[in-house]
Amino acid sequence: MTLSSTTPRPLIAGNWKMNGLSVALDEARAVAAALEAKPPAARVAIFPPATLLHRLSQAVEGAHLLTGGQDCHGKSSGAHTGDVSAEMIADAGGSLVICGHSERRTDHGETSAQVAGKAEAAAAAGLEPIVCVGETLETREAGQAVSFVVSQVRDSLPTSLAGKAFSVAYEPLWAIGTGRTASVDNIVEMHAAIRAELVSRFGEQGRTVLILYGGSVKPENAREILAAPEVGGALVGGASLKAKDFLAIIQAL
Ligand code: PGA
């Protein structure tokens, strides 16, 4: 996807992680129906498990709801048992893909160099990558959160994203699935540092790349987080599984 010259609309992304059987398609249909009745201020996307991507994309086709993959391989095809390529995600109806989520970095040992390869493959297949970064509690307590995350941004974004649509998601690991959110001050400080890195790397384009926040975003805290400077949307895990909660977050914008 090529970048438009205007500032992109915010993005609210629902990451279902390894949750969702066929019956969960009803939640996506409910989100699509509500957004049809009241079009959202943001772009909205759901990232179901790979097994549901095609059916979910078909179920919400034509609605104000995009779909995407939770990960992709750096190659377009080949002998990589169990992996899914960016082309396959596009073929299944997805238009975005999450790259380098901390659960992939932790559970599968993904390095920032590999994440950059995935983001490059995603853009080459016409998908919009959401590249995730974030520090552990240990790194934050050592006072190194900002320098750690900025270097993750540097190493996880391939130069080939210049001129392409992509976003960055800041997700402190200690806030994911814990019910604990970063303070607005923490978020503002980190997003400003990520913005500076994006501008130094991508020039003018770096000013408009969306920086999402993720980590225990819920209906109760969404408004405050989404109103903070340099917050271009949210990557929502647990609270995206139920249409009612996800819609409340979408409507907080
Ligand atoms: P959470 O997950 O909202 O359940 O904390 C966010 C994420 O990991 O994307």
Image: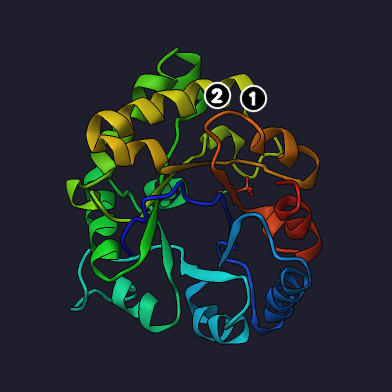
Where residue 184 is drawn, which disc sits there? 1
The response on whether ligand 1 sits within 8 Å of label 2 is no
Q: Is residue 191 above or below residue 47?
A: above
**Crowd tier of the residue under label 2, counting other residues whose Cα lies within 10 Å: few below 14, some 14–19, many 20 or above:** some
The residue located at (25%, 52%) in the rendering is 163
Residue 215, image x, y percentages: 60, 41
Q: Nearer the viewer, residue 11 or 86?
A: 11
Q: Secondary structure at mark 2?
A: helix
Residue at the far top in the pictured view: 143
The response on whether ligand 1 sits within 8 Å of label 1 is no
Residue 74, image x, y percentages: 23, 63
Regarding residue 223, the answer to whether it shows in the image is yes
**Crowd tier of the residue under label 1, counting other residues whose Cα lies within 10 Å: few below 14, some 14–19, many 20 or above:** some
Q: Nearer the viewer, residue 129 or 85?
A: 129
Color scheme of the displayed model: rainbow
Q: Is residue 111 left or right of residue 18?
A: left
Residue 45, image x, y percentages: 56, 64
The residue located at (45%, 24%) in the rendering is 192
Where residue 188 is drawn, which disc sits there? 2
Q: Amino acid at mark 2?
A: Val
Q: Amino acid at mark 1?
A: Val
Q: Is residue 162 above or below residue 20?
A: above
Q: Report the number of discs.
A: 2
Disc 2 to disc 1: CB gap under 8 Å: yes
- Quadrant of the drawing holding the N terminus: bottom left
The residue located at (45%, 35%) in the rendering is 134
Query: Dividing the picture into quarters, in which one does residue 181 lie?
Result: top right
Q: Is residue 249 above or below residue 87?
A: above
Q: Secondary structure at mark 1?
A: helix
Q: What's the distance in space between the residues labelled 2 and 1, CA to CA?
A: 6 Å
Q: Is residue 161 left or right of residue 22?
A: left
